[in-house]
Amino acid sequence: MSLGVGHLQSLLGSLGRLARSPLSTLLTLLVIALALALPASLRLFVTNAQAATGNFGRAIDLSVYLKTDVPLAKAQQLAGAARARADVAEVTLIPADKGLEDFRNYSGFGDALAALKENPLPHMLHVRPRDTASSPAALEALRGYFAAWPEVDLVQVDAQWVLRFNAILEVLRELMMMAAALLGAGVLAVIGNTIRLEIAGRRPEIEVIKLVGGSNSFVRRPFLYTGLLYGVGGALLAWGIIALAITLLQDSVATLARLYGSHFELRGPSGAEIGTLLGAGAALGWLGAWISAARHLRSIEPRA
C-alpha cells in the first residue's frame, strides 16, 4: 500500500469516526469556532472602523501662523520651502485677506469686522504631512521645524483627536493579539483533550496495531487527521458565525451611516483573512493533536 493511499485511508477513517458521533463533534467544533471567531471579529471591527472613518490618519494637519508683519511674498517663499520637505504631502497658503474674508462670511460678525481699519489676521500655512509621517514623533519633529522659523508666531497641530483615535485602535489591535494567543492556547487544549479521550477509547486497538509492528507514526496518523478536521471544521464554522453577524448587522449599520450622511457598508472578511482563519484552524488542530498523541501514545505498549 502506497503512502498516499495510507494517508487517504486515515483521513477518511477520521472523518467517519467524527460522523458517527455528530453531537459531540458539533459541540467540539462550536467551542473551537467561538475561540477562532472572537479575535477574527475583533480584527474585522478594527478594519471596519478605519474604513468608516475614511482613514483618520489623513486628517492630521498643522496650522502654521506667521507673524503679522510677514509680507505675502515671504509667506509664499516659506510655503515653497515647506513643500520641498520629504515628509510634507501638501501645503496651502491662506493669505490674511482670504482668511479675513472667510471669517467675515462664516462667523456672522460681518458688520462688526467692517469697522476694523486693518486686518488683524496673519498669513497662515495649512500643512498636511505624508501618511508615513503621521506618528506622534514625526508630527512633533515637523512642528519643531516650523516653530524654529523666525517668521512663525504659532504652530498648531490639529491632530489630538486623531492620535487618540489611533491609540484606541492600537489598544484594540493589542487586545486582538492577546485574545488570539489565549484562545489559540484554548483551542490546543480542547483538541488535545479530545484526542486524549479518543486514544483512551481506542487503547485495545492501538495495542494490537503495535503488537503486529505498527510504528508510533503510523498509529499517530489518524489522530493527526482528526485534529486537522476539527481545526478546519471549527474555522469554517467560525467563518459562518462571522458571516451571519455581518448579515444581521448590515442593515442597522447602513441606516446609522445614512444618518451621518455616509455611504459606508459593513464589509466582511477578505479572501486573505478567510485563508488566514482556515490556516490558523488547521495549524492549531494539527499541532494540538500531535502534542496529545505524541504524549499519550508513548505510554501504550502491547501487553504480552
Image (tube, rainbow, N blue to C red):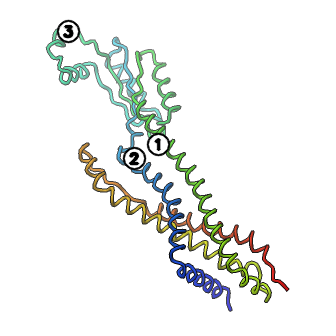
Q: Earlier in the sequence, mark 2 or mark 3?
A: 2
Marks 1 and 2 in Cβ contact (< 8 Å): yes
Disc 3 versus disc 1: distance between alpha carbons?
47 Å
Residue found at the far right of this picture: 304
Left or right of 228, for residue 220: right
| 140 or 56: nearer the viewer | 56
| 138 or 216: nearer the viewer | 216
Marks 2 and 3 in Cβ contact (< 8 Å): no
Residue found at the far bottom of this picture: 1
Left or right of 60, for residue 202: right
User: Residue at left 78%, top 73%?
Assistant: 298
Disc 1 versus disc 2: distance between alpha carbons?
9 Å
Q: Earlier in the sequence, mark 3 or mark 1?
A: 3
Tag in front: 3 or 1: 1
Q: Position of residue 191 (x, y in %)?
A: 61, 67
Q: Position of residue 233 (x, y in %)?
A: 51, 71
Q: Earlier in the sequence, mark 1 or mark 2?
A: 2
- Name the amino acid, label 3: Leu
Label 2 sits on a secondary structure element that is helix
- Name the amino acid, label 1: Leu
Residue tagged 1: 169
Residue found at the far left of this picture: 111
Left or right of 89, for residue 280: right
Q: Residues within 10 Å of mark 2 (few under 14, many from 20)?
A: some
Disc 2 versus disc 3: distance between alpha carbons?
46 Å
Residue tagged 2: 49
Q: Position of residue 204 (x, y in %)?
A: 73, 83
Q: Residues within 10 Å of mark 1 (few under 14, many from 20)?
A: some
User: Residue at left 67%, top 78%?
Assistant: 201
